[in-house]
Amino acid sequence: MVNDRFQGTGTALVTPFTSEGELDEAAVSRLVDFQLAAGVEMILPCGTTGEGINLTIEEYEQIVTSIVERVAGRAVVIAGAGSNSTKQAINLAKLAKACGADGILSVGPYYNKPTQAGFVEHFRAIAEVDDLPVVIYNVPSRTGSNILPETVLSIAQIPGVVAVKESSGSLVQAMEIIKNKPEGFRVLSGDDWAALPILAMGGDGVVSVAANEVPERIHEMVEAALAGEIAQARAFHYSLLPLMQANFIETNPIPVKAMLSMMGLITESYRLPLVPISPENRMRLRQVAQDAGLVLKAEV
């Protein structure tokens, strides 16, 4: 199966809240419009960066539906729909489809620490629910378990599984998957810092945190790399590297939400156990943003 829609630049979209902690639908619309204007191919709400684990089912339905309606077919909407419970992951996949999503991002089960065989059966059960395309999300730093390359390749044979968001932190692992993947199966970098190396090795795109802040520049980097213009892509990569790194000076999405607030795009509001960025890191983040040429609100 060739999946030309699941490649290019994807944005791991933050979930904006009001100062009262409710969903901020006006801010959602601003963020989506910002992404679409930059030409991103994929928008991924309700994942790690979107604080999906802290959303109620009603909020999940509200945000995915509103994004699907706002996007109106101009990008692929891949809704976060993972859980450490296979049954719950299936329920979220069904809900994502009902909301109109084009696919789901399903994280490897966390806390349970399944065996490699367990990973295969988990994703098989999700993929067999309906015809909504499934993107595997491998992020062992969050889940505590690595989906090994041979396991990803086994899961890739399951009908309906179209891509992997590879966030193991290992370029060797990414290479093994790219080298041996079935035709049409897409390998997306799940880390901004690894996007260029993975693209240069034959990968297909990135699911980016920094694209929340600089979607046009991330898109230009990915486009250049996919076109084989590595020198140009490398220039983009190194110009953006301080921002990519700053987004993780504290737990994601704390820094990126602080940055988007500085840019005037959202209210800086989190759900516990996440809390606002520390004062010293806020100063550091603001300097990185200024160095990157971002237009920020005046400090109050």
Image (tube, helix red, strand yellow):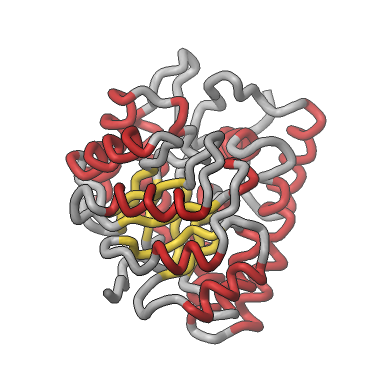
Tell me residue 239's x, y (percent). Answer: 70, 65
Q: Quadrant of residue 124?
A: bottom left
Tell me residue 90's x, y (percent). Answer: 29, 40
Q: Residue at x 74, y 33 (%)?
A: 282
Give the total number of marks visible in the rendering. Answer: 0
Residue 202 makes an appearance in the image:
yes
Q: Is residue 253 left or right of residue 124?
A: right
* Quarter placement of the N terminus: bottom left
Residue 297 makes an appearance in the image:
no
List the single residue furthest toward the bottom: 228
Q: Is 103 drawn above or below residue 251 in the view shown?
A: below
Q: Quadrant of residue 76?
A: bottom left
List the single residue furthest toward the top: 20
Tell me residue 145's x, y (percent). Answer: 59, 47
* Quarter placement of the C terminus: top right
Tell me residue 64's x, y (percent). Answer: 29, 38
Question: Which residue is at the front of the view, 148 or 80?
Answer: 148
Q: Quadrant of residue 232?
A: bottom right
Q: Residue at x 54, y 86 (%)?
A: 228
Q: Residue at x 48, y 47 (%)?
A: 108
Q: Residue at x 66, y 71 (%)?
A: 172
